[in-house]
Structures are given as structure tokens and as C-alpha cells.
Image (cartoon, rainbow, N blue to C red):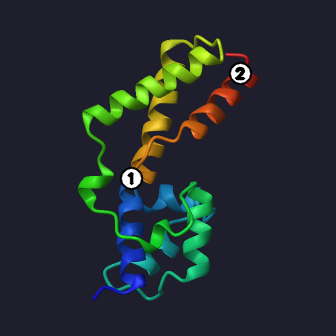
């Protein structure tokens, strides 16, 4: 039977892939380089991912508390075309409700951010999209 530490390690490896490698994820987590993550998930990990570390990662990445402790099948992490369609619709609806019409590049960025969030959490997060749109409104775009 897999331990919670094994599950956390698998999830961290998945996150490293989603964030474009250990250095990119390390920076997002507030570290200067990927060596800390290598200690956690390298071929021969020298450290376990503790409860405290798992909760800090979840908080910094905007994941639900406990996400690191649960198994997430790899095919469940990849959203299908239907899910992407739903993300596009959700972004369009929030923009319409906010009476905003961003340029195509900005719209594409909003969809990408919402889609990346959906890949991480396994669901479309409408509140996250609303927060992005509020930021957009504040930027004057």
C-alpha cells in the first residue's frame, strides 16, 4: 500500500511537469532553484514531503487543502476538448457579465490561465476566472 509520502511525491512530480520543470515550480514556491525539489522527488529522495510542506505548496499553488495527499490519475489531469470548450465559455461569460471586451491576446491569456487552473484542480474555477477579470478591469485593458 502506498504511503501518503509516496502520493505526495507522485503529485509533486506531476506538478513539476505541469509547471515546466523543477526550476519554474521552485520559483513559484519561493525557492531560488530546483535543488530543494530534487531532494523531495529525485531518483533517491533524501527528504519526505511533510504535512507542513504539502500544505504550503497547496496554498502557494492555489490548490485545495489536502490535494497533495490524494491520488490524481494522470489521465484525469489532462482535460479533454469538451473541458477546454467549457473553460472558454466560462471566461466568455464572466467577461460578458463584466462588460469587458479584451483584445484577442489578453482573452487567450485568460483562457490559458483558467485552463491551467482547471488542470491543477480538476474543475473549472469560476471564482478564479472572476478574480482574473477583476485584475484585468483594474489594469485598464
Image quarter of the N terminus? bottom left
- Residue 89 placement (x, y as % from top left): 43, 23
Q: Where is residue 8 shown, x and y percent of the image?
A: 42, 75
Q: Residues within 10 Å of mark 2 (few under 14, many from 20)?
A: some
Q: In this view, does 84 lie to the left or right of 54?
A: left
Q: Residue at x 45, y 79 (%)?
A: 40
Which mark is on residue 137?
2
Residue at horizontal 63 percent and vertical 27 percent from the top: 133
Q: Pick whichever, 138 or 35, lies toward us.
A: 138
Residue 6: quadrant of the picture: bottom left
Residue 43 place in picture, x, y as percent: 31, 80
* Residue lying furthest right: 138
Rate crowding at label 1 as few (under 14), some (14 to 19) or many (20 or more) other CA atoms within 10 Å. some
Rendered residue at 71%/21% (across/down): 137
Element class at badge 1? helix
Which of 15 and 118 lies nearest the eye of the viewer?
118
Residue placed at 48% from the left, 14% from the top?
Answer: 104
Seen in the picture, residue 13 relative to 19 is either above or below; the reply is: below
Residue designated by label 1: 18
Determine the CA span between mark 2 and mark 1.
28 Å
Residue 109 location (% of width, % of height): 50, 28
Dividing the image into 4 quarters, which one contains the C terminus? Answer: top right
Amino acid at each position: 500500500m502506498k504511503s501518503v509520502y509516496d502520493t505526495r511525491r507522485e503529485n509533486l512530480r506531476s506538478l513539476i511537469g505541469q509547471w515546466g520543470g523543477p526550476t519554474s515550480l521552485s520559483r513559484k514556491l519561493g525557492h531560488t532553484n530546483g535543488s530543494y525539489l530534487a531532494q523531495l522527488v529525485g531518483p533517491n529522495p533524501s527528504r519526505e514531503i511533510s504535512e507542513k510542506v504539502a500544505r504550503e505548496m497547496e496554498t502557494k499553488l492555489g490548490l485545495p487543502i489536502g490535494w497533495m495527499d490524494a491520488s490524481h490519475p494522470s489521465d484525469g489531469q489532462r482535460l479533454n476538448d469538451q473541458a477546454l470548450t467549457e473553460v472558454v465559455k466560462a471566461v466568455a461569460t464572466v467577461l460578458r457579465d463584466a462588460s469587458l471586451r479584451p483584445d484577442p491576446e489578453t482573452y487567450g491569456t485568460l483562457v490559458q490561465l483558467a485552463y491551467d487552473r482547471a488542470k491543477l484542480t480538476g474543475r473549472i474555477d469560476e471564482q478564479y476566472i472572476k478574480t482574473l477579470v477583476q485584475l484585468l478591469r483594474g489594469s485598464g485593458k
